Image: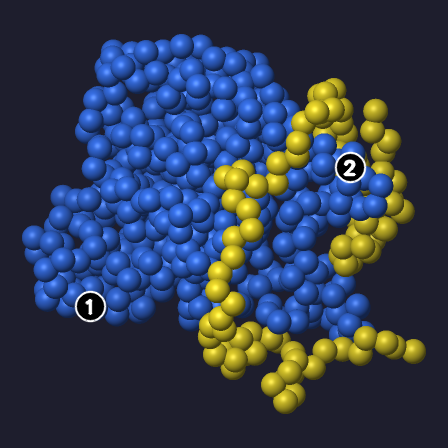
Amino acid sequence: MFDMLNASQVAHIAKLARLGLKDGEEDKFAHQLSDILGHMEMLNEVDTANVEPTSQVTGLTNVSREDKEERFCQKEELLNCTPLPLEKEQIRVKPVITQ
Amino acid sequence: MMLHSLTLAEASEGLKSKKFSSLELTEAILARINKLNPVLNAYVTVTGDLAKESAKAADEKLAKAERVSPLCGVPAGLKDIFNTAGVRTTCCSNIIKDFVPPYDATVVEKLKNAGLVLTGKLNMDEFACGASTEHSCFGVTANPWDTERVSGGSSGGSAAAVAADISFYSLGTDTGGSIRQPASFCGCVGLKVTYGRVSRSGVTAMASSWDTVGPFAKTVRDAAMVMNVIAGADKRDSTTPPVAVPDYTKNLGESVKGLKIGVPKEYFGEGIDHQVSAAVRAAIKEYEKMGAIVKEVSLSYTKYALAVYYIAMPAELSANLARFDGIRFGSGPKRKTASLVDYYFATRSEGFGDEIKRRIMIGTYVLSAGYYDAYYRKAQKVRTLIIEDFRKAFQEVDILITPVSPFPAFKIGEKKDDPLAMYRADILTIPVSCAGVPAISIPCGFTEQVTSGGVNIEKRLPIGMQLIGPQFSEEMLLKTAAAYEQVTEWHKMKPVL
């Protein structure tokens, strides 16, 4: 049986995913996520001892192309997508290290 | 004959023979959008001026050129997940509600080269996560057959627009059922292609080992016409194999005599609405009358597909949505932030809806240290077993026929706060996605109308059936679907709006 997630575990997962949760949301999500993950436990009844995992369904591997530079959009068009200020063709972000 | 109710093939023919111009066709559709969209909420952006300009350009092309694409000058809206240069593309999420992409998705580029008249962008569940469009930041899309019900999801806007004659065809994306299920809820044709058959470059990624792009249409022929333009390998999407693209309209009308049809017993069991299974069984009888050979088969791992999907998909989704940090695109957070990490938290907490947060957290959890093998790797192994199921079935039969959804369109609000109940809406479409095989959803009947004291308490709702084939068998699926269309009238039924 799946052990219920508690509010502090949910807070930890949310932190890992950089999701800010509001007050009370931890409890709501703890309940919903436990329900969903509990349902997934049914996979344990399947014997997969000698089964290979699948991550690509059409069998393509190592698709490569010529190592040649190709222009895709103008630099300005891409820089214009940011909501943040630009400086010397770079995006100025908030400080990474604060006091 | 009202212009808006033409099929794509009829509209194309009318343009070619100069019965009407693209501008007339476009103005008719824009007027109808204007009238119906306040009720349906299928379009989240209408590009009226742009559409008229494109229509004029298409009319010139039609007048001059001898050989133009059959799609030239025909108006259509696209799901709001396809990048359209210069036209807002939101994925119906607050996190990129004002995003105007600088480039077109490959499929949009292909449609534009064919002469697309883009009428606007269509509603969807946020980042294609949902089965009802109730998780859209623009609100739900109403079902054209009963506006108290959902149009399905995630491509609900695309399905409703085609069913309501406010788009001659459309494109959607299907990861676990997002084209097939809304097509069945709204009574139109929806094709989920083989994984890799259509390029996904410029289409916002949801779950990368599952995502596909495909058409919505009023008829099977129309869907084939759209496939002729959008299918094929793309150097910008390395998951598109170099498999030849046939003319998908070529075999339409051919007989299905001798075709071996498999009916998987797991798809007709408990939890399937009896009106749905009865309609699909009646459709299978029609195929028998046409000379097809019907046989029961078993796909024994079917019941595990939902669990596989709800581990693997959120894992891939959480990785894909990590790029939404409010730095390179999006509008950033409203509240003031002190540091970079605070900026990330604020952007994502304000920008994502609850369903996205749930899925990101599940994905983060199943990929985190100590859980990877127990969840993600286990799911990938069971996925292999589901693929084996299909491989074995296709050694015995050519095609499988099943219902699309276990039930017809449900009421708005009915499942919104019960994630697991919403997820179960896709139990019959997810196994197909696991195997990366193609499937088409076509109308095969209606539920019964229920009246009480002269009042209509249950309206007639469309029912869809799913035809499933091996990888890259779209041509055979379209041919088989077209044969059914020839002997039935379901695809001609129109909602009263």
**Tag 1, which chain?**
B
Query: Which chain appears blue?
Result: B
Task: Using the image, determine if residue B423 lies above or below residue B330.
Answer: above
Tell me if residue B118 can be seen. Answer: no
The residue that appears at 61% across and 29% down in the rendered structure is B384
Q: Is B300 left or right of B325, judged from the image as shown?
A: left
Q: Secondary structure at mark 2?
A: helix
Residue type pointed to by label 2: Asp
Res. B56 image quadrant: bottom left
Task: Say which quarter of the image contains residue B403.
Answer: top left
Amino acid at pointer 1: Lys
Q: Secondary structure at mark 1?
A: helix
What residue lies at 64% left-to-right and 49% top-to-bottom?
B317
**Mark 1 burial class by Cα count in 10 Å: few <14, some 14-19, many 20+:** some
Q: Position of residue B489 (x, y in %)?
A: 24, 26
Quadrant of the frame with the C terminus of chain B: top left
For chain A, the rendered hue is: yellow
| Cα separation between marks 1 and 2 | 57 Å
